[in-house]
Amino acid sequence: MRIIQDLPSLKKYVTSAENIGFVPTMGALHAGHLSLVATARQTHENVVCSIFVNPAQFNNSADLARYPRTIEADLAMLESAGVSAVFIPSVEDIYPKPTKLSLNFGDLETRLEGAFRPGHFQGVGLVVAKLFHLVQPKTAFFGLKDLQQCLVIWRLVEDLSFPVELSFLPTLREADGLAMSSRNVNLTDNERLIAPFIHQQLQAAWQSLVAGASPDTVRKAAQLAFEANSAFRLEYFDIVETESLGSVSVLPETYAIVVAAHLGKVRLIDNLLVGD
Ligand code: AMP
């Protein structure tokens, strides 16, 4: 596995490697990231993984400072996962000068995550566009755990005609249902024990919807359940249309149940996709 830490070396690698499968990450890797790598490897001889904690997508400096960094363990995991190259750029490599460019994703960047993390998706769009230009992948792999991110990147690729295929893959969970996330290591032992509450609420909501309850009723029931559990501070719990992420009042065939909540110092997000 090559470890590439500067742009000239990346350029050299990209010129010699064909059909790159690309898995962009912020490090602190877990089995969810490795599932993207494993899928990429099935169809791509050359799999490149990037590790870059992108300051432009953090609207909260404490969150950026707290973001876990475990580079040695990450490299060991990627090596045994059979990655061909890992790209670890510096902030200066990615942002040599401050940019005035701003991407606008319309409703997609202001709903849900965007409402609580202003500017987040502009930062995501910017870094993914830069990484696509630098790595020139044939296919890029992203996790549906970050559903809104997948939609933003899909728009980016469509609207700017990036010659990149996108592959969106299911969320890997711990045995108790908690969605795997780099941030989970910041949970205390007690918080970790109660964290699956989030996934339980998603499943309870899905069961109620399937049994015929209206989205409004289900939304309110979930909000009450979170209010009754003082360990959590709910940001949103919603039933949304999967492409626009607009809230629904009548249940479509395909929809997503989405949630974001703080547990202690950790902000957790999760979703359930129903239908195609
Ligand atoms: P991150 O390092 O959090 O930016 O995540 C890098 C990629 O891994 C993103 O495409 C995420 O959606 C994806 N990812 C994160 N957690 C999971 C998970 N539990 N299962 C599958 N993919 C995930």
Image: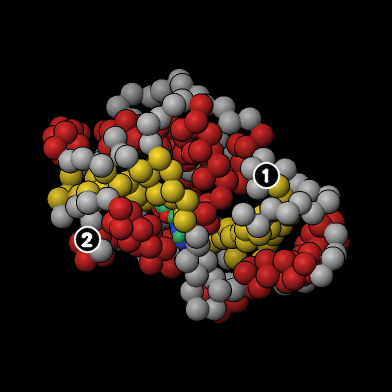
The residue lying at 70 percent from left, 47 percent from top is 241
Percent across and percent down for residue 64 are 44, 48
5 relative position to 190: left or right: left
Percent across and percent down for residue 78 are 25, 60
The secondary structure type at the circle numbered 2 is: loop
Amino acid type shown at disc 1: Leu
Percent across and percent down for residue 10 are 19, 37
Q: Is residue 223 above or below residue 95?
A: below
Q: Residue furthest top?
A: 100
Which quarter of the rendered picture does the N terminus lie within? bottom left
Label 1 CB-ligand 1 distance < 8 A: no
Q: Quadrant of residue 275?
A: bottom right
The secondary structure type at the circle numbered 1 is: loop
The residue lying at 14 percent from left, 37 percent from top is 16
19 relative position to 195: left or right: left
Q: Give whichever of discs 1 and 2 has the lower sequence position.
A: 2
Q: Is residue 12 visible?
A: yes
The residue lying at 36 percent from left, 58 percent from top is 39
**Observer-nearest residue: 62 or 122?**
122
Q: Which residue is mark 2?
A: 82
Q: Quadrant of residue 14?
A: top left
**Observer-nearest residue: 77 or 272?**
272
Which mark is on residue 31? none
Q: Quadrant of residue 35?
A: bottom left
Q: Is residue 245 above or below residue 78?
A: above
71 relative position to 187: left or right: left
Q: Ligand 1, what quadrant?
A: bottom left
Which mark is on residue 245? 1
Visual colour scheme: secondary structure
Q: CA distance from mark 1 to mark 2?
A: 36 Å
Amino acid type shown at disc 2: Gly
Percent across and percent down for residue 113 are 61, 46
